[in-house]
Image: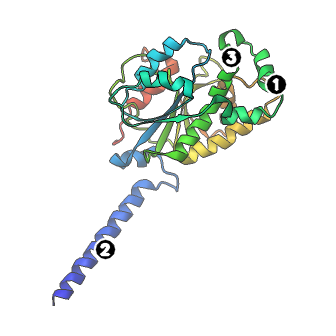
Amino acid sequence: MCWRGFISIYVFLLFIAACLQLFRLAVWTNDSQPSAASMQDAGNLFDSTLVTAYFDIPSKHSSDDYAKWMTNLLSVQDNIIVFTDNYSRKRVLENTASTKKNIVFIQLELNKTHIAEIFNLIPDFWTRQFSIDPEQSIHRDYRLYWIWHEKTSFLKKAKDMNPYNSDFFAWIDMGYLRDRKYAGKQLITGIPRDFRANQVMMLDVSHIIPGFVGGGFIGGFADGIDRWYSLYYKIIWENRGKFIGTDQPWMRKSCEVEPDMCYLVTPRNDGGDEWFYMATFLSSQNKTT
């Protein structure tokens, strides 16, 4: 009769496994598009990766400024992927917390990036772009355009690699954290419950500069990042006859072409710099409510 007891136990275990699977599906499924709610309710299943880059070229800010700011970003608890070149990597390492273990460096040269190679097929394209830049005295080097427009490609590459088996990925500028407020802390603690898997999240700065979004942060799940990647570079290419050096108006244009693509966050007047509000916003989200 012992075998009957074993069969009963086996059947019971199969029943428990089936219930657990149904529960998992209930948590992760919402009209076939996982939302932030499913991620948050899953609790410890939620994980994220920050994606950033640093290339030491002439830009709007000095190398010393970036050294100070990158120290702030590279000391958070979040998983981080950094894109950089051989020359710039040393400076990044110098400003990375010695205890930071969950960080990956991807080395590549700027002229080998997706955006550079696409438009390098057009003779003198970037030189002509720089010549019509109304802010060229501030931007100083057309390679800065490459970094701005490559953010989306960096984000997709990080998503495809996914060394930390993350669910949510967020591009964040290396200089986004201007103080030590988040040092040693988790920056992304959750995401809005109504954010959908086929969207990307960005900062709405239209009240500051009409027709712009904040280019310092782009977040999303895998489906949303893939969708954004295809749309954004399509818009850039179609408008190559105009000045496309600055990314923010073309990001906004992409959002307007597909209005359900972008989840835009309006900064609240919390006393901080509105351009960097996404740090405040995502560090205050509760992943279990």
Q: Secondary structure at mark 3?
A: loop
Q: CA distance from mark 2 to mark 1?
A: 66 Å
Residue 141's label in the rendered image is 3
Residue 124 visible = yes
In the rendered image, the vertical position of residue 125 relative to residue 23, given as above or below = above
Q: Which residue is mark 2?
A: 14
Q: Secondary structure at mark 1?
A: loop
Q: Which residue is mark 1?
A: 124
Q: Amino acid at mark 1?
A: Asp
Question: Which mark is first along the chain, 1 or 2?
Answer: 2
Q: CA distance from mark 1 to mark 3?
A: 14 Å
Name the side, left or right, on which 258 lies relative to 129.
left
Would you say the residues marked 2 and 1 are in contact, meaning their CB atoms lie under 8 Å apart? Answer: no
Frontmost residue, 216 versus 191: 216
Residue 198 visible = no
Q: CA distance from mark 3 to mark 2?
A: 63 Å
